[in-house]
Amino acid sequence: MKIRILTILALGASVGLGVAAHAATDVASTADQAKLKATIENCAVCHGGNGHSVSPTFPNLAAQQPTYLENQLKAFKNETRADPDAQAFMWGMASQLDDQMIGELAQYFSTQPPPPSEPGDPKLIAEGHKIFHEGIPAQGVPACASCHGADAAGRGMFPRLAGQHKPYLIKQLLVIQSVLRTAPVMHGVIKTLSRHEMEAVATYLASL
């Protein structure tokens, strides 16, 4: 009889501990979700809650490659991406993020609907299309599509460019070309691009 009572008490204690552990997990999960929501709201001030940014100064994040987003957030946090806008806008913001939050933000924005296309000069769009898909062999410029994909949706570490703001794309090409932003793969690719050629490619990409 005593053994039976002890067994029942032990089982009851075990169930109680299990319920308590589950409750603690739920509390932690709720707290994590609240923290993620608050962080997304901070991002939304510049990038929009769904990743469609409020100004061409700030990139669209919607439908961006998650690996690329993670890499850039870590570069901001580590202060290894040091172009002027990164220092001004992102170093302080990213310094507060841990790896888990970085991963969750990357996943969230990567699953948002792509940004809308932007109309542009048909002549520039056609010129940009040719550069993006064929490169400029005479200048040693390879086709952008070879890394960023035929639809410019990106893959892995290579970012989505489709639907990105034209002014933002041009600025990034300029800071990479001048080595204000470190991007080893891109330095050699765009070193001979003229400002007009950058504008053509950016106009095409924004139109997608």
Image (cartoon, rainbow, N blue to C red):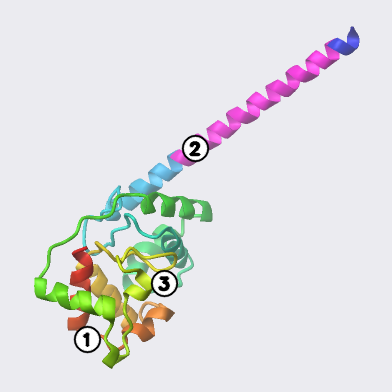
Residue in view at x 80 percent, y 19 percent? 10
Residues drawn in magenta = 5-33
Name the foreground residue: 87 vs 7.
7
Is the residue marked by circle 3 packed among few (<14), some (14-19), or many (20+) residues within 10 Å?
A: many
Amino acid type of disc 2? Ala
Q: Amino acid at mark 1?
A: Ser
For marks 1 and 2, give the CA distance: 50 Å
Residue 22 occupies quadrant: top right
The image quadrant of residue 192 is bottom left
> Which mark, residue 81?
3
> In 3D space, how far apart are the residues under numbered discs 2 and 3 (Cα atoms)?
31 Å
* Residue matched to label 1: 194
Counting from the top left corner in percent of width and height, residue 108 is at: 40, 49
**Is residue 16 on the magenta stretch?**
yes
Earlier along the polypeptide chain: callout 3 or callout 1? 3
Which mark is first along the chain, 3 or 2?
Answer: 2
Of residues 135 and 31, the one drawn nearer to the viewer in this rendering: 135
Q: Quadrant of the C terminus?
A: bottom left
Give the labeled residue for mark 2.
Answer: 31
Vertical side of 58 occupied by 22: above or below: above
> Does residue 77 appear in this view?
yes
Residue at (35% x, 70% y) in the render: 148
Q: Secondary structure under badge 2? A: helix
Q: Residues within 10 Å of mark 1 (few under 14, many from 20)?
A: few
Disc with the residue nearer the chain's start (1 vs 2) = 2
Element assignment for label 3: loop
> What's under tag 3, amino acid-wise?
Arg
